[in-house]
Image (spheres, grey):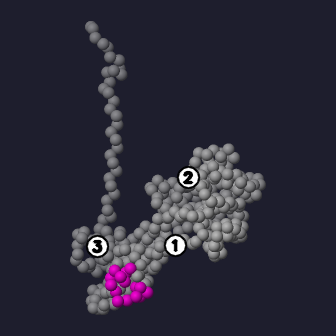
Amino acid sequence: MDGHRLCHDCRMPPTLPPLPPSPAPSPSPPPTLFDRPVGCLDPLQLEQRAAIITMWKEGVDRSTIAARIPCSLRTVGEWVRRWQREHSLEDKERTAQSGNPDWKMADSIVALAEERKFITPKEIVAELQLPISARTVRRRLDEAGLHGRVARPVPMWTAEHIRKRLSFAEGYANWTEADWESVIFSDETHIELSPHGHMWVQRPVGAELDPEFVVPRKLHSGRVTLWGCFSAKEIGQAEVFVGEFDAVKYTDVLAHNLIPSARAFFPSGQWWFLQDNAPQHRAEHSRIWLHNHGIDCIDFPALSPDLNPIENLWADLKHRVERRRARTMEELEAGLREEWEATSTTLLASLAHSMPARIAAVIANKGHQTAY
């Protein structure tokens, strides 16, 4: 019989490519605690008010509380303030105060500050056209637990940044203070001739890292750059320079400062080098230089100043330099060198030994910002 005899593979039906995985369902909002329609304007019942205070005392953020009741964010703020002021959630207490213009004015002040986090007392006076001074507004905000503080800048992280921070912390969770004594911490910072300005924010106690109350970091110009390093036992060499800081300049700084410092710190034995993920540190030229010189680098996560204790050393150094009130760049550079050499060895040991606590804090906070 004529025809083509198919082999086994030819007789088999074609294999279809696997279907792509179904997208993960988007997370559903937290369930509400009460049978209360979203957007309802009816007054809250007593048990709903009590639930607000209970969650607030447990540290639940106000946005979550509003979603769980449900009610508006302003309603949550009003009942929290009522509780702080009167320790009562009864309607009769509200009625007793409802005719008092001072309480009405205070509630308006606090409500505006909660709605616009970065407004100042002077701006509140103008916005509400109040017949009182900015100092009185400041007192009202303090009484409500909204204290004027400099907004803390935080890095702009992605989910991948947070994952790598947590991975780093878990990888070094077993390192002891003695282990961190074998590390050279390094970085560069920028020092200006005049001190930096601050942005003030009205925020509750304990909310310094809340995204609603922080500002992005800003770059500055017209400055000198300082590279330095230290170990748990002593300060290392440093270099002050002005101008471009690329990978070629970076490796030149390392050759003239890191290598001599390492020889002084660790005449024999293993040591590790900790640097952040600045572009000049990650450049191929720098990586080849470090490899050729046999330097073991710690794989440090990006945008993690709270995990590098040299950031605290910079803060201490800048404070000391600013007290000198340098008037020229020459005075600034001279002051930097003198204050660098005067750094306390007790401070250096404390900073290096803080690494286990920093790592534990990152793990406890699931990779997010810590107080360091």
Residue 73 drawn at (x, y percent): 32, 73
Label drawn at residue 279: 2
Q: Is residue 59 left or right of residue 310?
A: left
Residue on which the image places disc 1: 197
Say what secondary structure mark 1 lies in: loop
What residue is shown at x 70% (from left), y 56% (from top)? 257
- Report the quarter where the N terminus lies: top left
As drawn, 326 above or below 284? below
What residue is shown at x 24% (from left), y 70% (from top)? 39
Residue on which the image places disc 3: 71
Say what secondary structure mark 2 lies in: helix
Residue 227 drawn at (x, y percent): 64, 60
What residue is shown at x 50% (from left), y 73% (from top)? 198
Q: Nearer the viewer, mark 2 or mark 3?
A: 2
Q: How many marks?
A: 3
Say what secondary structure mark 3 lies in: loop
- Marks 2 and 1 sit apart, C-alpha to C-alpha, by 27 Å
Q: Is residue 304 left or right of residue 316?
A: left
Contact flag, marks 3 and 1 (Cβ < 8 Å): no
Q: Is residue 361 left or right of residue 262?
A: left
Q: Main secondary structure of the magenta part?
A: helix
Amino acid type, callout 3: Cys
